[in-house]
Structures are given as structure tokens and as C-alpha cells.
Amino acid sequence: MQPTTPAPRFAFGPRNFRLMWLGLAVLAVGFITMMLDKADYGEGFLGLTLGPILLFVGFVIEFAAIMVRSNPSELAPVAPAAAAPVADEFKPLALQVPGPSAAAPTPTPAAPRPAKPAYKRPG
């Protein structure tokens, strides 16, 4: 009987990837919008207001794409765990019953205490 390895389960599902592509598209539109500003040095409405707002929205979408949990139905199916081995495969263990001649168990020593530090704080 060979053990079955479960199928890989990825953290991102299709929903996450769609959000990531949407975020990248909004980021690209934001940068292009900032380049299209015809005012000197990009100091018009497109370069100072609309472009940065689109960039902010794009980064929020990217953050959401990373943080949003995928639906369990969208994830790759996980193979069932390996079945429990059949009882025939196990060999019974020999029971060891201590007799009257068996020595009493020795107590385990307590863990040693940590040594005191060799230095002293000034002051």
C-alpha cells in the first residue's frame, strides 16, 4: 500500500489573481494619467490629483488581493488522508511485566539549577 501525497494547495485562488490583475491595471492607468498631464512639470489636475488617487486605489486593490481569503471551492482539491493501516500489518508487542526480582525504578535527578552570573552590575 503506497502512501498518497496530497495535491498542492495554493494560497491564492482565481479570485486573488483577478484582483491582482485589476490592481495592476489601475496602477498602470494611474501612472499613464500622471504622464498625460499637459501642465508644466505635471502640476495640473491629472498629475497632482487624479493620478495619485488612482495609484492609491490600485495599491489598495493589490493589498486586498493578497489579504482576501479564497473560497474553499476555488482552491485545489486536497486528497483524502491515507487510510489507517489494517490491523494485520501490526505485530503485537510483548508485554513485560516486572516480577518480584525486578529492581525498583530509580528516581530521575532534578535538573541542575542555573549558575549565578559571574559579573556584578555597577552601581
Image (tube, rainbow, N blue to C red):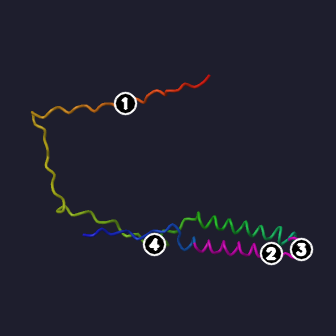
Q: Which residue is rendered at x = 38% and y = 68% of the image? A: 6
Question: Is 30 one of the magenta-colored residues?
Answer: yes
User: Mark 3 Cα within 10 Å, few/some/many (few <14, many 20+)?
Assistant: few
Which of pointers 1 and 2 lies earlier in the amino acid sequence? 2
Location of residue 109 with respect to 64 vertically, above or below: above
- Discs 4, 3 touching: Cβ within 8 Å: no
Q: Which residue is rendered at x = 24% and y = 63% of the image? A: 85
Residue 51, percent from left and from top: 78, 70
Residue that carries the numbered disc 2 in the rendered image: 35
- Name the residue at the top extreme: 123
Which of pointers 4 and 3 lies earlier in the amino acid sequence? 3
Residue that carries the numbered disc 3 in the rendered image: 39
Give the number of the mark in front: 4 or 1.
1
At label 3, the amino acid type is Ala
Q: Is residue 100 left or right of residue 45?
A: left
Residue 58, percent from left and from top: 69, 69
At label 4, the amino acid type is Ala
Q: Is residue 54 left or right of residue 100?
A: right
Magenta-highlighted residues: 17-41
User: Mark 4 Cα within 10 Å, few/some/many (few <14, many 20+)?
Assistant: some
The label number, if any, that marks residue 25 in the structure image? none
Q: Main secondary structure of the magenta part?
A: helix
User: Mark 2 Cα within 10 Å, few/some/many (few <14, many 20+)?
Assistant: some
| Spatial separation of the CA atoms under disc 1 and disc 3 | 77 Å
Residue that carries the numbered disc 4 in the rendered image: 76
Give the number of the mark in front: 4 or 3.
3
Residue that carries the numbered disc 1 in the rendered image: 112
